[in-house]
Amino acid sequence: MNLALFDLDNTLLDGDSDHAWGQFLCDKGIVDAREFEARNNAFFEQYKTGTLDINAFLDYVLAPLATRSREEWRELHDTFMNEVVFNMINPLGQALVRWHVEQGDLCAIVTATNAFVTEPIVRHHYHVPHLIATIPAIEDGRFTGKHRGTPSFKDGKVTRVKEWLESMAMDFSSFEQSWFYSDSLNDIPLLEAVSHPVAVDPDAGLQLRAESVGWPVISLRGRDENSAGSGIILPGQA
């Protein structure tokens, strides 16, 4: 059995679900749109340059979750899925995940975005049984507005994957081959941990790293999994 790990935002998805969720809250009047949008955009720019303070970011973006019941949030998330996420779903990303699943690989989506936002996306659109995401804390049945445990970000992704594998009495050496697909320079630590790192429509920082060390670079931006010239090369075709 092999291991296949996938980043979600701007890798499998055509967009960033974390940033889009913040914009959704602004558009629905759930948060102060002017202030939240400015902070959300500033954090996003820091993320793209690899300078994001993940704890400061989580303290800010998770805080609204403490203001409503989980049922209210589930209903809002359903609207978010229908109005926003549906347009981000990438058939080529789905095809890549499906290929690994059909090979019998152990598959997981590994994302810095919190599990409240990402779990329905993964369940409904990618059908991967394992999600490693930042965990929003819950007490007495309500979100606290804080996170719990190690955020699934940068080196934290490696930590969380190792913990997940250890829970099944495995580690990276348990697999003959392992893949991780990502677009972001923030994911270089986990890319370095697998035998087959793949840069997917990479940002400038990851593009430079991939070129310098010879990592393959692919594109999942063709939208149609049957389209010619999409740039997707499945592992069995490499």
Image (cartoon, helix red, strand yellow):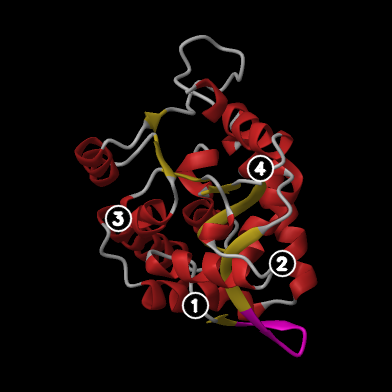
- Residue 124 in the image, given as x and y percentages of width and height: 75, 45
Asked whether the residues under the numbered discs 1 and 2 touch, taking CB atoms below 8 Å apart as contact, a structural biologist would say: no
Residue 150: image tag: 1
**Camera-nearest residue between 115 and 145:** 115
Determine the image quadrant of residue 120. bottom right
Mark 2 secondary-structure assignment? helix
* Residue type highlighted by circle 2: Trp
Farthest residue toward the top? 228
Residue 73: image tag: 2
Earlier residue among tags 2 and 4 = 2
Gap between marks 3 and 1, in whole Å? 22 Å
Q: Which residues are magenta?
A: 137-144
Q: Which residue is mark 3?
A: 45
Q: Residue at x 45, y 79 (%)?
A: 59
| Nearer the camera: disc 3 or disc 1 | 1
Residue 83: image tag: 4
Asked whether the residues under the numbered discs 3 and 4 touch, taking CB atoms below 8 Å apart as contact, a structural biologist would say: no
| Nearer the camera: disc 3 or disc 4 | 3
